[in-house]
Image: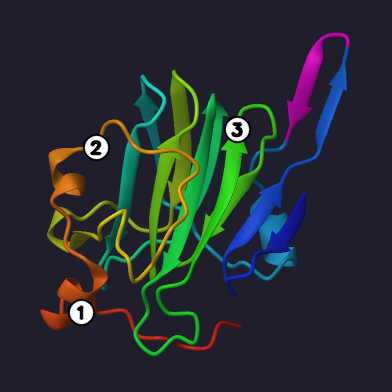
Amino acid sequence: MKVTETKLKGVYVVEPRVFGDARGWFMESWSKKKLEEAGLFVDFVQDNQSFSAQKGILRGLHYQQNPMSQAKIVRCTRGAIFDVAVDIRQGSPQYAQWVGVELSAENKKQLFIPRGFAHGFITLTDDVEVQYKADNYYAPECDGNVRWDDPEIGIEWPIEPTILSDKDEKAPTLAERRAKGEINFVYEEMK
């Protein structure tokens, strides 16, 4: 596995080695040992999967508040997405900065997103399946979101969204969440 840090400290692209022959291919999609060798110590406790029927579906930007914040490793196993991580930790030198990576069934790349980051994606094709591991269980009482088009963040989505959930359409901006004290992540230097 190749593990490469992105422009945002703590966010990594994980590229599994793929072995192919006349039968097809094989890859190790996740290895605790190999992530730990890269300095990522995470105990995943939950696997999630989503299906999006059409190109242009946007999901995000989502996060879970402390004490139930989540680190995630995301992959696209059917179709393609533009996957985004946004640093929302108060006091972080990269606060409100984002990174986006195309994940697809074809390129098999994965994105590791640490705690304290919001996450979202837009589908680049029809019939998309996304799978991700989380290091904390889903906790609806800690659920949060920020607007996908928040000007403070300024994500450059590769296409315009065509479908959003009602929850995502009505999400507040980062400034609105901050003003109400609704984001409790505090920056700590990552090891």
Q: Secondary structure at mark 3?
A: strand
Residue closest to the far top: 22
Marks 3 and 1 sit apart, C-alpha to C-alpha, by: 33 Å
Name the spot of residue 25 as percent of width and height, x first.
78, 21
Q: Nearer the viewer, residue 107 or 163?
A: 163
Residue at 35% x, 58% y is: 136
Circle 2 packing at 10 Å, graded few (<14), some (14-19), many (20+), is: some
Quarter of the image where the C terminus is located? bottom right
The magenta region covers 22-27
Label 3 sits on residue: 104
Label 1 sits on residue: 178
Q: Nearer the viewer, residue 180 or 56?
A: 56
Decide which of tag 3 and tag 1 comes sooner along the chain: 3
Name the spot of residue 41 as percent of width and height, x first.
58, 67
Q: 6 above or below 94? A: above
Q: Secondary structure at mark 2?
A: loop
Circle 3 packing at 10 Å, graded few (<14), some (14-19), many (20+), is: many
